[in-house]
Amino acid sequence: MSLITESKDLLPINIGGEMRLGGGDESATLYPATGEVVARLRAPSLADVDEAIARADHAFRTSGWAQRKPHERAAVLYRVASLIRERAEPLAQRQRLDNGKPINETRALVASAAATFQFFASACETLEETITPSRGDFMTMSVYEPMGVVAAITPWNSPIASEAQKVAPALAAGNAVVIKPAEATPLMALELAAICEEAGVPKGLISVLPGRGSVIGDAITKHPLVKRVSFTGGTSTGKHIAHIAADKMMPVSLELGGKSATMVLDDADLDHAVNGVLYGIFSSSGESCIAGSRLFVARKLYNEFLQRLSVRAAALRVGDPADERTQMGPLITAKHRESIERYVELGRSEGASVRTGGARPQGELYARGNYYMPTILEGVKNTDQICQQEIFGPVLVAMPFDNEEDLIAQANDSVYALAAGIWTRDYKRAWRIGRAVQAGTVWINTYKQFSISTPFGGWRDSGLGREKGRLGILQYMEQKSLYWGLNEQPLAWAN
Ligand code: NAP
């Protein structure tokens, strides 16, 4: 595995199992806390993209990976999980440098990646095919086949975990995988591919093609040998990919943006709700698709709740991602911070007042990093742009609500429908609201908890398809029906 220490050398990328410099533009990955260069590499050229996909297709057809018995493929994936665990700390440190998340979060992402490989290894071993009820002189069964070359296109906010979520089921299903990590965070995908090869995934079956999405991601998506794209990222990119997929008649899964509603009812346990709301929006500095970024609080609690929340938000420990006590690190890039600042200005122009935050933190520690304070805006309407658009940063909009009907209508009044949170002591209300709210995931008296066994995805502009869960492996397989004739006589029609 590559060292954490900075190097002036250009980092090779994985083109069809060959580690070499890409033929495209040079780019650098910067440590968001200081702006220092962590690594430099050259993106693939379009010829490199073609070569990587051709090699992946060749490896799919000739390496025997897809033909290995499920327990043999699973054994390799279990080894991937073990290797990730053995190297957990250096991987977590490298990811911290790559995207600036606090070390405790990157440790959790690395642990999650290992667990994902373990889970899909077992899904591969235990996947069942079915004998279906026949309605004639034949036996019928339904089986699954791998697809060939599939693409995994991932964003910068949770590398290694996002990549594992796509690569593990794709490999378990017998496919070849081309990974297109975000240009800003290419390092973990390269590490993961190296670990997969070390564990026994045939060379060429995995490629890592970092580079600008509009060029490299586009070329991968359009490539005729790519049979499926699993994409995580913004909604507009997701729609663009869906258009290309429609032309190719190619299945896609799209894990997209969100503006998730968190609802604090008048009977909520406020200690739990305050902690949950803070964690829901400000962990990962709000750079999270499922961030609980729209807060609705029962009017009678509103002032007390906002008071408690804003005091606690202002006290969050924003700072050095290497410090284990840090709760919020820097944002991914200076450009992204500027976009968040523009959103806060937009909110102000729409009449929002800033309850807390709304500025960069001051002091030596923050001088070179892309830091922003946890921010709460209020005095807004759910129909305002600040309440409708995804900010993808540490900005919460807060609104009071009057009754359940009003709450549900507002919570569902969004193009997004990724997640929601409900805080109440009344399980019947939680059930009612939990069923009425339109979202792929609803948390009740908790938030942002995950299980690899539980399917994940969004409705409406938040996405298409589901990842994770035991049947997540089927996203990467084609279903086939087999009919076995059992008739004693030739088919009568032709007589
Ligand atoms: P993004 O701009 O859509 O980028 C995501 C990935 O797509 C990157 O690798 C990007 O490459 C690539 N890409 C960009 N244009 C492309 C194109 N024309 N064809 C193919 N690939 C292309 O999203 P982002 O700003 O990096 O990530 C934040 C977004 O992701 C937010 O909206 C967030 O909610 C969403 N997200 C969703 C989930 C979920 O599970 N629902 C999880 C995490 C994040 P480059 O960056 O290198 O250009």
Image (tube, rainbow, N blue to C red):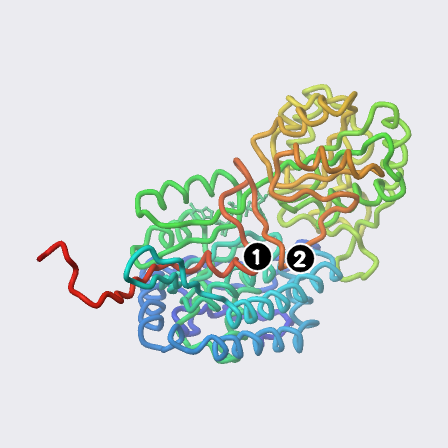
Residue 341 falls left or right of residue 193? right
Q: Is residue 348 above or below residue 416?
A: above
Q: Quadrant of residue 406?
A: top right
Horizontal and vertical percent position of residue 388:
62, 28
Q: Label 1: state its secondary structure.
A: loop
The residue depicted at 66 percent of the width and 65 percent of the height is 110
Q: Which residue is mark 2?
A: 451
Quadrant of the drawing holding the C terminus: bottom left
Alpha carbon distance from label 2 to label 1 = 8 Å
* Outermost left residue: 495
* Outermost front residue: 488
Q: Is residue 483 above or below residue 368?
A: below
The residue depicted at 35 percent of the width and 73 percent of the height is 59
Judging depth in this view, the residue of 407 and 212 nearest the camera is: 407
Q: Judge: label 2 CB < 8 Å from ligand 1.
A: no
Q: Which mark is residue 231?
A: none
Q: Which residue is mark 1?
A: 468
Whether residues under marks 2 and 1 lie with C-beta atoms below 8 angstroms apart, the answer is: yes
**Type of the residue with mark 1:** Lys
Residue 479 falls left or right of residue 124? left
Q: Label 2: state its secondary structure.
A: loop
Horizontal and vertical percent position of residue 493:
13, 54
Q: Quadrant of residue 486?
A: bottom left
